Amino acid sequence: MRLNKTPLTIALALLLGISLVGCSKEQASTQTASSTAESTKSTDKTDFYSRELAKLKENMTPIHVAHNAEASQKIPKDFKFVNAGYFTVAAISGAPPLSVLGPDNQTYIGTEIDIARLIADSLGLKLKLVRTSWEDWPLGVLSGKYDAAIANVTVTKERKEKFDFATYRQDVLAFYVAEKSKIKAIKGPDDISGLKVIVGSGTNQEKVLLDWIEDNKKKGLPPGQALYYDDGASASLALQSGRVDALFGPNVAYAWQAVNGAKIRLAGTALGGGTRPAELGVTLKKGSGLVDAVQTALNGVIQTGEYQKVLARWGTQAEAIQHSAINPPGLGD
């Protein structure tokens, strides 16, 4: 799954931009409609920010764990961390509940950050976060700029050629529609027949969607269409006005927005691996030797319960795994 800033912020734009749809088509009623829309927009924004801020404040306190000697003993003796004494992790900010700047405007928090801290503590290291983008983390990991990336990265056959993975969460993809949409459910290719769906470019969800579209073509059905938006406000207007039918992306991010008041609802989920379940993994340079230590650290916190506490406080417990795996089958296998 690509953590793409456009699809992950569309849901927020849906909330903040919903009043745009209410603008009158007739010039004569513009002033009245604008006043009503602004009032609704202000209320929606206040409700959303109040809910989100309360949750972010509640989750500012870090969850720490004790050093796991078994995990640290699996660090190769010749392995050199990017920064001595630190576990340096690439993280992508701006996508709650995964990673976001906290209410103090200084501290990055989120489920991905908490997972990184659990691993660092287990290895007897301090955590050093490096803010990056989806486009930059692969080269950063390969070049040794970071020890690892924890950025909602799905395990795929292609990625395993360059990276090692220790999994930490299920990859659940989801279709979300406008709150008042007539679409009741999207469960498979037939359900997107003739629909226009916004998806992030270069993501595994794009691959899943395109496979569904091809499946419909083979059946002789209207295939459906993948659409790409660089601007969240435009995507918002398109969804709420009915010019597009659905959003397809990481369930964890859209669910966060829906719970906090975005005018969208869940229409269905899909497997991150297309036809099989897939998992998200801590991403390390292939052959670096660190993956065994990271996996042991993750399995340690799964056994002691801190892992479950992290997911529960961010509302992602439904995507928990029972055991961290190294390089499991994924999309393309």
Image (tube, rainbow, N blue to C red):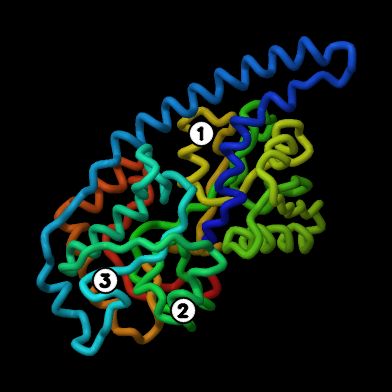
Q: Residue 252 in the image: state x and y as whole percent.
A: 46, 46
- Foreground of the two, 157 or 1: 1
| In the rendered image, the vertical position of residue 168 relative to residue 163, given as above or below | above
Cα separation between marks 1 and 2 = 33 Å
Give the image quarter of residue 66: bottom left
Which residue bears the numbered disc 2? 160
Q: Residue 295 in the image: state x and y as whole percent.
A: 26, 70
- Answer with left or right where residue 302 lies relative to residue 273: left
Q: Residue 237 in the image: state x and y as whole percent.
A: 73, 35
Q: Amino acid at mark 1?
A: Ala
Do residues under tags 1 and 3 come within 8 Å of each other at their CB atoms? no
Q: Residue 177 in the image: state x and y as whole percent.
A: 63, 37
Q: Residues within 10 Å of mark 3 (few under 14, many from 20)?
A: many
| In the rendered image, the vertical position of residue 42 relative to residue 74, given as above or below | above
Q: Residues within 10 Å of mark 1 (few under 14, many from 20)?
A: many
- Answer with left or right where residue 234 lies relative to residue 145: right
The residue lying at 42 percent from left, 27 percent from top is 51
Q: Amino acid at mark 2?
A: Lys
- Foreground of the two, 131 or 228: 131
For residue 294, which numbered disc appears in the image?
Answer: 3
The residue lying at 40 percent from left, 57 percent from top is 170
